[in-house]
Image (tube, rainbow, N blue to C red):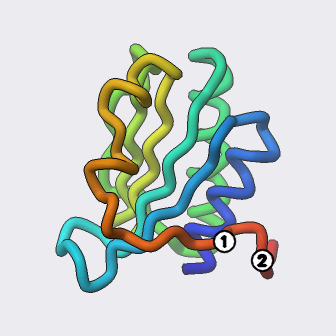
């Protein structure tokens, strides 16, 4: 859970909007957590993913997949237990993962984020 909270904080610190963590434990075998955020530009979204990847390497969290980096309208970074979804505003509204996973509790990522 700490990795999910820290990635949410990194997205927020880099001016991503509407950062949310969904707790999928016991709901889906896909992942334990989804971190979802809206980026304001393709450059910003790539920078956020790059910083998350650097942090992941520091804490031994290996990224197993990356999709959408080139187009940066929906970037998905898969760390197995934690899946990061960075959307532009239009894609976030269209795919509406919060509604799709509406039964998943939200985690307060602002509590006890460690470096």
Tag 2, which secondary structure? loop
Q: Which residue is mark 2?
A: 111
- Horizontally, residue 104 falls left or right of residue 86, namely left
Numbered disc 1: secondary structure: loop
Quadrant of the snapshot with the C terminus: bottom right
Residue 90, disc: none
Q: Is residue 92 above or below residue 51?
A: above
Question: Is residue 52 shown above or below 47?
Answer: below
Image x and y of residue 51, in percent: 67, 45
Q: Quadrant of the N terminus?
A: bottom right
Q: Quadrant of residue 91?
A: top left
Whole-percent x, y for residue 13 in the image: 81, 45
Residue depicted at 26% across the width and 50% down the height = 100
Q: CA distance from mark 1 to mark 2?
A: 6 Å
* Res. 58 image quadrant: bottom right
Instruction: Examine the image and state in which quarter residue 25 appears.
Output: bottom left
Rate crowding at label 1 as few (under 14), some (14 to 19) or many (20 or more) other CA atoms within 10 Å: few
Q: Measuring 72% from the left and 51% from the top, which residue is drawn there?
A: 10
**Residue positioned 67% across, 24% down in the render:** 44
Of residues 67 and 109, the one drawn nearer to the viewer in this rendering: 109
Q: Are marks 1 and 2 in contact (CB under 8 Å)?
A: yes
Q: Is residue 15 left or right of residue 6?
A: right
Q: Give the residue pinned by disc 1.
A: 108
**Between 67 and 108, which is closer to the camera in this rendering?**
108
Image location of residue 85, percent across then percent down: 43, 43
Q: Is residue 12 visible?
A: yes
């Amino acid at each position: 859970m700490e990795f999910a909270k820290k990635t949410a904080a990194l997205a927020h610190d880099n001016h991503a909007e509407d950062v949310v963590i969904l707790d999928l434990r016991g709901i889906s075998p896909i992942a334990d957590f989804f971190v979802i955020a809206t980026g304001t530009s393709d450059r910003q979204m790539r920078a956020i993913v790059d910083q998350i990847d650097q942090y992941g390497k520091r804490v031994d969290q290996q990224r197993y997949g990356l999709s959408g980096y080139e187009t940066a309208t929906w970037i998905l970074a898969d760390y197995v237990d934690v899946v990061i979804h960075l959307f532009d505003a239009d894609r976030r509204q269209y795919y509406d993962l919060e509604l799709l996973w509406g039964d998943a509790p939200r985690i307060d990522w602002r509590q006890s984020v460690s470096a």
